[in-house]
Amino acid sequence: MSKIVMAAAIRGARKIVGEAEEFLNKAIKEKGKDQKVEFPETAYFLPMVYALLGIEVKNLGDMIPVLKEAKSLLREEPSQSLWLPYLGDALDSGIATLFGEEIIVALRYLYGKEPQPDCVGFYTDTWMRSYGIQLVDGRMPGFAVILGAAKDNKAAVEIVREFQKRSIICFVGSSSNGKSIIDQLKEENVQMGWETYIVPYGRDTITAIYAANWAIRAALTFGGLKKGEALKCLKYCQNRTFAFGLTLGELDDVKYATGAGAINMGFPIIADTDIPEVKPSGICTYEHLVKELDYKKLVPTCIQVRGVKVKVAEIPIPVSYSAAFEGESVRKEQMYVQFGGKYSTAFEYVTSRDLDKVEDEKIEVIGPEVDEAEEGGAMPLGIYVEVAGRKMQKDFEPILERQIHTFLNEAMGIFHMGQRDMCWLRISKDAKKKGFKIRHFGVIIHARLHDTFRAIVDKAQVTIYTRQEDVEKYHAQAKKAYEERDERMAGMTDESVDTFYSCTLCVPKGESIVLADGSFDKIENVIETMAEERDVEVLSFENPHLTTKPIRELFVNPAPRKLAHIMTTNNNLIRLTANHKVLVDKPEGLIWTEAGALRKGDRLLSARTADLNGRNQDKDKSLYLIDLLPDEVKVFDNQFLQQLKSAILERYGKFGNAARELGIEWRKLYYAFYFPKTTAYRICFYRLTIDEIRSICQEIGWDWEIAKQRINKFGVPKAPGCELKRLILDEDIMYLAGLIASDGHVRHRGKGTYVQFTNSEKALIDKFGQIVKSLFGVLPKTYVVRPLKSSAKGLTIIGRKPINVSLVYNPLIGKLMLGLGIGHKRKRGEKSESWTGEKISQLSPKLTSAFIKGFFDGDGHVTDTHILITTGTYKGAQHIFLLLKKLGISTYITKIKRGYQVGTRSFGDYIRFREVISSNHPRKRKKMDGMKTSFDKNHVVRTDTVPLKCGKILKELLEKYKKKIEITKLAVDYKSIEAWTKIKCRASKGKLKLLLHSLKGKIDENDRLYQELLKWVESEITFEKVKSVEKVRYNEKEVYNFSVPGTHNYLVNWIVAKNCQSFAPNHLCIVKPERLGLCGAYSYIDAKASFELNPTGPNQPVKKGECLDPVRGEWKGVNEFIYQKSNKTLDRFHGYSIISCPETSCGCFECIIAILPETNGFMIVNREFAGMTPIGMTFSTLAGSVGGGAQTPGFMGIGRLYIVSRKFISADGGIKRIVWMTKELKEALGDKFKKRCEEEGDPDLIDKIADETVATTTEELLSYLQKVKHPALEMEPLI
């Protein structure tokens, strides 16, 4: 092995371990040995240390033996005269490097220095399980750790694209000559993240440890190895985890040392520079260190050296095809053409035919091809797929149809979302440039159907329609088939589409998602922004604080019939699907609870502010006014146009050449730059729009962000241009916007917009005029009218002061307001707010405050205890509520005769409003400033509390130090402390902070319990009480969702909501012809179809074998299967009994059946029912006992249509044992249940079964059953 290489590795190891020691000593000095240290979301502490040394590093003190071990592995650099083997020394130094790097990055996390900007940082266990299993089971061939920077950006992109094509994940980072491949890919707008298989770890070599400890966890998780089994762990990585390092640019000592660590794991290193090679095999399968100077051969060399087995999809299309491209988005500016969504009609439909009716490989496009589409435009699309096969069945059609989403998404440059007639597709400009056609959709679908479903598909032909009349014709056929299919396949479940969502949680159209900077936007806009424009980050709860997280996958799903409307006591409304979980504070901790199961009084997690100590808000963020103007506004700035004219002629020579290259009509282009001296306003001449000017600037190489700063004169057709005296949006303009939104309006006349502001306060009219003049150089027209009398909804208001009216006849001011979301044109009779807050919320806090100030001055008032703002609609009030929340001001909403009011919630909120927002209205300002506090300095805000579990933590802490603490002499009275520790109430943050401060010096301040309480005291999390939960009809077609990596939650209208659901590892459903899956989504035919389509998938055949008990439904083969698949925790199932060995539940059941011993029968409650049941528990409380794979005699989760099966708990008496079920469930089962009652010989049974209208206690129920003579009372005892 090369002495040069090994010497460099040893030097690098010494450097890293030295840095680790210095950093650790600093941390211990500043924070103490007991300071907790950890990586986020891992059970493996410091994974490399845990795997190889068996040490659980929980605090700084635990790092000392690790550092000692690392130092013991360091060796001296070989001398010039030494020629003995030194491979072992170098490899030992490599392991020392890995330990040192892991210590450094863990300490960086402690100090908040990781992850680095635009980087993932530590790879959590969630991602390791999601992708790591694919590495070890062969679905993902391997992964590359790329360090440094390529010779140029183009080469960097080509390298990662080649790996993507082969489904090889790339961990990218480190730097060479001050440049990182991360920045190269960013500059080329390459989307990075787990979903695209390009994962940035950090810009220095030390952070490459994230990839190494991600790999070592595979050995612990999937290899079943134990901590400290170093050799076995390293061997597992060598044999099962096919990874390699690729260094780009010059190698330094640290890269050599890190490479030596990787070689210990069996991962070879390939370099693009002329370095000494180490070719003999030994630790690695083949060579250890190899150079490849030809960039075209870099990726093949990597694959060859590591021995990666790669299968590249061979589909005859002009773009790369791989699962790595499935998470790729095609933004609006990248798009050539799109289909469906809100832009055109589109559908996808799969139908089966007889074998002789399908011509395999026949792919037709009937209508225009992509070449005939207008760039940036939309086309109709109908994808009509006909399949045939000897094993093909009608029930398989929707399963194949749903796969079109995955099939098309895996083509590079193609975006697909949704299904059926809710699909949305895009072809990127790059894909079109490479020759991708609409026909290739059919090529992909045909190839993948044969590849994926060869067991049932013998032939497939695809017809694609792109003419509107054809699409409408076949869409009608498809819609009819969708309806018939739903009735046929989901006929066993009335609401199968709804229940499919027990694991897919969704938010309806119109709900506001809180973004990373505290701004908010409708969820449908968030989805569209992600798909069309850019990556989006949201605020997310990460115990016990808020953090920022990126959005990953997007989902659009069919909507349920009803939504859960949750109203909190501050009258903030949140709408969710009934099974969407929100975080609730309960005595046992923070519990994810389904929206439909919430009860009055439940406390939901919210937050008092969006400001995460300035980390997530750009307080100096500026916005140019030109960015608020619509693209069709004309540019009138002759000085700028003269400069642009010179640049155009310099580039193209003549206007004729320029017109051809720019795609603008020659006459229009020529006259746009023709400046006659005699015509002052040039009203009759051509003017280019902002959009056209922007496009020209980009084509000639001008930076639009700089060029736009030189334009200050704009106009509309047939009007003179207007000069803007200010170019940047400032607080004065936002104050003006607030005045207009509250007490003014935007008039729409033709293509122009004009503004009126009306108010009785002369000072505000004067302020309005001053701002208008400073912006346009002209005062508005002002006049006075007599006091007015107005009536609405039975309320009459008689004015006492003259009304001042101010009119601005400038077409730009209305356009600017529209750009801020103010003054949108309403349809006749439409009852909606004339403004929305989404755009305003995206501005800096100062600008948002200025808007609120103007709104308050226009339509607000002050009392002795509250500051109040009035709006005409609830949505307007909620947007004020959300805007104030961004500023750290908590409010409540109330309904009044004039509309709605938003009021400050506490004195602290009053003071913050006064300090951050204030007023220009003389009387309001005077009253606001004159308000005096009426309480002492120790007053606390009762709504700003910590969770109930903090009471338990405090109790444990006080018990631990009871010998050092006199509880009656603490800063908080004993009765309050007792109430907290007995979970009678929540502790206020203010009082708990006083208590913790008084404990200083009496306890160890680094104590885990004390630190946890301190974190909650400093947390921005608050709790909102549920006022009501209702089921309300939802008329939209779709609902939305997205995934948030790591935390798996986001904020809807400032309430923490979940985006995924856990599963029970020991549970499995046994789906039988007469018992569907407990989620209601899988029937017997579904499970059978799933196995036919995917023989290695989740639905496997279970041979019944010998029948052990035909009455209870027990078979030997089923028991054996259950024993193996339940991790040997269960050994018997009785398929027809709930009393004896009942089947288990994962948690996604539609209903719960529970024994009521007093009645000798069972009750059934459905998931949607939030009320109390005769057993004394709600659905959500019952679910905690029934779910999780537990086998609980007398309790079981079921699919609702199992109730009308003849096998329904037949061993225990069947439906005659049902003594109580919800009214909603009775109605939902309807005629099916009546028919079963008739079959059982008791047609009146349905009336004998009680519901919540007659009984919610066992006493009431028993009385009712005796009255109606229910048959269960006379059946043999259940127990």
Image (cartoon, rainbow, N blue to C red):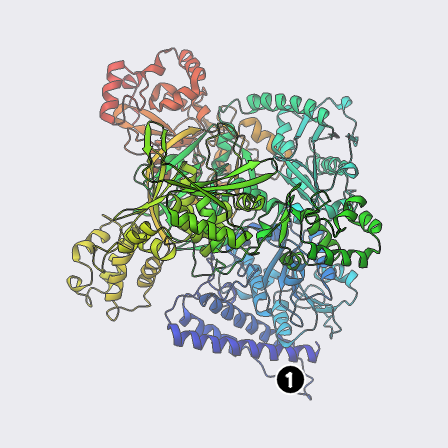
> Is the residue 995 above or below the residue 425 in the image?
below
Image quadrant holding the C terminus, namely top left
Judge by depth and name the residue closer to the eye, 215 or 999.
Answer: 999
What residue is at 26 percent from the left and 53 percent from the top?
987
**Along the viewing direction, whichever of 356 and 1251 lies nearer the viewer:** 1251
- The image quadrant that residue 350 belongs to is top right
Residue 686: % across, % down:
73, 44
Classify 10 Å Cα crowding around label 1: few (below 14), some (14-19), many (20 and above).
some
The image quadrant that residue 859 belongs to is top left
Total marks shown come to 1
Q: Residue 1228's x, y, as percent? A: 43, 21
In the picture provided, is 36 more to the left or to the right than 631?
left
Report the residue that reaches farthest toward the front.
678
Going by the picture, which residue comes out furthest to the left?
A: 968
Q: Is residue 107 above or below residue 724?
A: below
Q: Quadrant of the N terminus?
A: bottom right
- Examine the rendering and report whether any part of residue 1054 can be seen: no
The amino acid sitting under disc 1 is Pro
User: In this orientation, does residue 481 appear?
Assistant: yes
Residue at point 33%, 15% (across, down): 1247
Residue at the image position 35 percent from the left and 39 percent from the top: 571
Q: Is 731 on the left or on the right of 469, as rendered?
A: left
**Residue 320: % across, % down:** 74, 48
Residue position marked by numbered label 1 in the rendering:
78
Q: Position of residue 404 (x, y in %)?
A: 66, 36
Numbered disc 1: secondary structure: loop
Residue occupying the point 52% across, 79% down: 18
